Amino acid sequence: MSLNNPVQLTLGVRLDDDAKFENFYVLDDNQLLIGELQREFSMLYVWGARCSGRTHLLQALCHQESAIGGPAIYIPLAEHQKFSPELLEGLPALEVICLDDIQSIVGNSDWENSLFSFFNEAKENGARMLVSANCSPKELPLNLKDLCSRFQSIPAYKLTGISDDEAIDVLKFRASRRGIELNEATAEFIYRRSSRSIDKLMKLLNKLDQASFVSRRRLTIPLVKETMGW
């Protein structure tokens, strides 16, 4: 469900309905970060590997703010070619701004300069800003050194990704959030025969959930085999 503010709608970026805090599988290493995100922080930098859950958390914060009527926006900078750097103008007036994959604009002087101005305005206006990248602030190779120093000045948290052993638990957890009974054997069967990417596993779970609903059958190994052709 997209957020009901004109900027988000203009972006044409749809938020994942399932990307909410209650649907995020929290590892012990990430407890501190999750707690911080659900408090009234000012600015935070979250970094981690691809598929570690960065996008989920940024969208979760937007969903949370939207639920209480606050203006929020999520911008995937991995798709910055679709947008103009001027997009950032005026955003500091919003309550919550989430910028995903800021490493994607490294080396683009127009975006770096716009982001620098945006950062200063957001801080001055008291906006809550959450940014994500695939590396720590010190490792972010921005050309604009003043922007580097800005990111290095705010709290940064590393988001620990899911290991192979934990992925089956994540699959069962997300299934239970949907009201699906998924036993250990079926979860392991799905995991061993599919992509190890959490994102792709969730898409697969969506497909299996639909097949279970349409056929009015429990999600078992035979149903998985029929649906996936395995």
Image (tube, grey):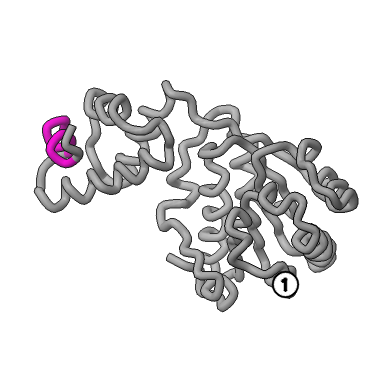
Q: Position of residue 65 (x, y in %)?
A: 57, 62
Q: Nearer the viewer, residue 124 or 22?
A: 124
| 219 displayed left or right of 8 | left
Q: Residues within 10 Å of mark 1 (few under 14, many from 20)?
A: few
Residue at 42%, 65% in the rendered image: 1
Q: Amino acid at mark 1?
A: Glu
Does 108 lie within the magenta span? no
Q: Quadrant of residue 187?
A: top left
Front one among 177 and 13: 13
Place residue 118 in its image quadrant. bottom right
- Between residues 207 and 108, which one lies in front from this camera angle? 108
Residue under pointer 1: 86
- What is the magenta segment's predominant secondary structure? helix
Expressed as whole percent of the image width and height from the top left, the position of residue 110 reads 78, 63
Is 148 above or below relative to 191?
below
Would you say residue 93 is visible in this rendering? Answer: no
- Per the rendered image, the range of residues in magenta is 219-227
Name the element at disc 1.
helix
Residue 178 to residue 61: above or below: above
Give the residue at x 22% y 28%: 186
x then y, percent, for residue 123: 81, 61
